[in-house]
Image (tube, rainbow, N blue to C red):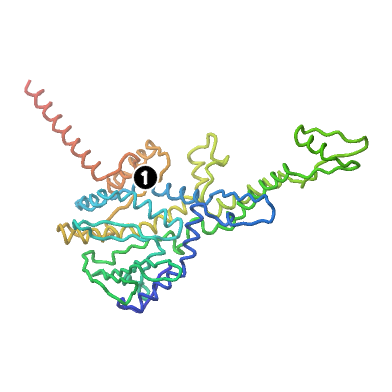
């Protein structure tokens, strides 16, 4: 995990802050390249050739990989629940007021592209807890060098990119107690210190995986090869159209050349030969190579090609699941790392609302976080599974969360119990009336 490590209990001195920023700046070029590749600004667009024909085609596998991974993981909203008796409604309300699902998607997309992304939790002017997404090229987490790697403080900054005037536009340091603001282009000039009530460093680092590598980062060389192959393929086609005409035993004059250009016909003496000079192309071999590169892109990125013939026809649900084994395993790994950030967010909001509104302290490990895969769901099969698991000690809210139509399992359970009670009361009233009659 790419962080900056210092001695245990170190304070955010000017020297440490500057060194942390400079360390993060060394990754700036990598982050920029990954963002550009997602946007389709890939290396093939910079290719120069001496010949006039220079097609530069971009088949944006990078965007496809990120969008498929992010949509599968977070296309459906995350569901939060706790054990019975614990109320998290105020925290969920704070999430809903700011459409936290949009932020979740943005964070996951950033992790897929650049390997990690940050979330800053802060208090608004109205004293409400809120979150903002921060790019990794503008933030870094500073931890101690013990085996626990405790988070000491986070740094959020922006550096001016003026050619001859590189300076800090702003630097903000977040400890578990306060926010420290530096300005006027110098880290050494402290402007303001403000206490906060989140109880932890309010900067959350989300990771895509242990190595903090983006989903398409390992296949960038293959993506470049695919773009190059397709571009040269089109170049060859255009060169075929513009092929040279070879005359053997004849030499056309200017009038004949004009006739050839206008009417596409030409008369040559007996025994003369006319033909095009072209480069032979073996389309079958080129197509085999194209498919091979594309298959490697999907295999190494563990992202299925949903347009492939393997996903058409009447394949059973089990058969399709087998084809998605590697993809599901990779998504499960991404989910575990993303969940770590969500638990810290919950704790930050809980600490702040406890201080502000007096809500009960709920330990993050008591929070149940359910990710719903964004695929067509078989609710009949899921309901049968839930019936089979009844009485095995699994909380009912956790079972209800597996149903695709249940967004809030606690509210769903509350409504269900109220309806059960109402129906029971009606049944008792009807029984009493029958007895009276």
Percent of width and height locating residue 189: 29, 76
**Left or right: residue 127 compared with residue 187:** left
Percent of width and height locating residue 152: 31, 72
Q: Residue furthest left?
A: 436
Is 409 in front, or is 93?
93
When the figure is inspected, residue 2 is found, relative to residue 208, above or below; the finding is below
Tell how many labels.
1
Is 420 in front, or is 42?
42
Q: For numbered disc 1, what is the local secondary structure? A: loop
Is 36 in front, or is 421?
36
Q: Give the quarter of the figure containing the C terminus.
A: top left
Q: Residue furthest front?
A: 255
Instruction: Sort mark 1 into few (<14), some (14-19) or many (20+) by Cα contacts within 10 Å.
Output: some
When the figure is inspected, residue 263 is found, relative to residue 373, above or below; the finding is above
Percent of width and height locating residue 75: 39, 46
Residue at point 69%, 44% (across, down)? 238
Q: Which residue is mark 1?
A: 76
When the figure is inspected, residue 210 is found, relative to residue 227, above or below; the finding is below
**Left or right: residue 157 compared with residue 305:** left
Q: Quadrant of residue 375?
A: top left
């Amino acid at each position: 995990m790419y962080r900056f490590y210092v001695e245990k209990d170190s304070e955010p001195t000017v020297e440490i802050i500057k060194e942390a920023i400079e360390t993060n700046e060394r990754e700036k070029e990598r982050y920029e390249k990954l963002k550009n590749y997602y946007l389709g600004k890939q290396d093939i667009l910079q290719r120069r050739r001496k010949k006039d024909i220079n097609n530069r085609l971009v088949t944006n596998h990078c965007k496809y990989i990120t969008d498929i991974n992010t949509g599968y993981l977070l296309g459906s909203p995350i569901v939060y629940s706790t054990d019975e008796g614990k109320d998290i409604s105020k925290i969920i309300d704070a999430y809903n007021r700011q459409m936290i699902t949009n932020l979740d998607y943005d964070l996951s997309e950033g992790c897929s592209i650049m390997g990690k992304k940050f979330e800053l939790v802060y208090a608004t002017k109205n004293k409400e807890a809120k979150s903002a997404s921060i790019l990794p090229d503008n933030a870094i987490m500073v931890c101690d060098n013990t085996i626990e790697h405790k988070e000491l403080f986070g740094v959020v900054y922006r550096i001016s990119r003026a050619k001859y005037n590189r300076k800090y536009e702003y630097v903000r340091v977040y400890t578990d107690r306060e926010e420290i603001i530096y300005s006027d282009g110098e880290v050494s000039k402290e402007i303001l210190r403000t206490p906060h009530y989140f109880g932890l460093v309010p900067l959350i680092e989300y990771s895509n995986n242990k190595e903090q590598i983006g989903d398409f980062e390992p296949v960038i060389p293959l993506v470049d090869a695919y773009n190059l192959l397709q571009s040269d393929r089109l170049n060859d086609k255009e060169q075929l159209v513009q092929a040279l005409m070879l005359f053997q035993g004849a030499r056309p004059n200017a009038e004949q050349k004009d006739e050839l250009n206008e009417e596409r016909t030409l008369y040559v003496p007996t025994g003369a030969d006319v033909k095009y000079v072209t480069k032979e192309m073996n389309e079958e071999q080129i197509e085999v190579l194209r498919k091979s590169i594309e298959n490697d892109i999907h295999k190494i990125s563990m992202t299925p090609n949903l347009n492939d013939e393997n996903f058409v026809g009447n394949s059973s649900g089990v058969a399709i699941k087998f084809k998605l084994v590697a993809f599901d395993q990779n998504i499960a790994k991404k989910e575990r790392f993303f969940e770590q950030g969500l638990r810290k967010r919950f704790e930050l909001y809980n600490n702040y609302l406890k201080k502000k509104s007096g809500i009960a302290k709920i330990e993050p490990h008591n929070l149940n976080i359910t990710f719903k895969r964004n695929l067509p769901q078989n609710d009949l099969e899921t309901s049968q599974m839930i019936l089979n698991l009844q009485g095995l000690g699994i909380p009912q809210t956790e079972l209800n969360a597996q149903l695709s139509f249940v967004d809030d399992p606690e509210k769903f359970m509350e409504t269900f119990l109220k309806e059960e009670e109402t129906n029971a009361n009606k049944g008792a009233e009807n029984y009493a009336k029958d007895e009276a009659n």
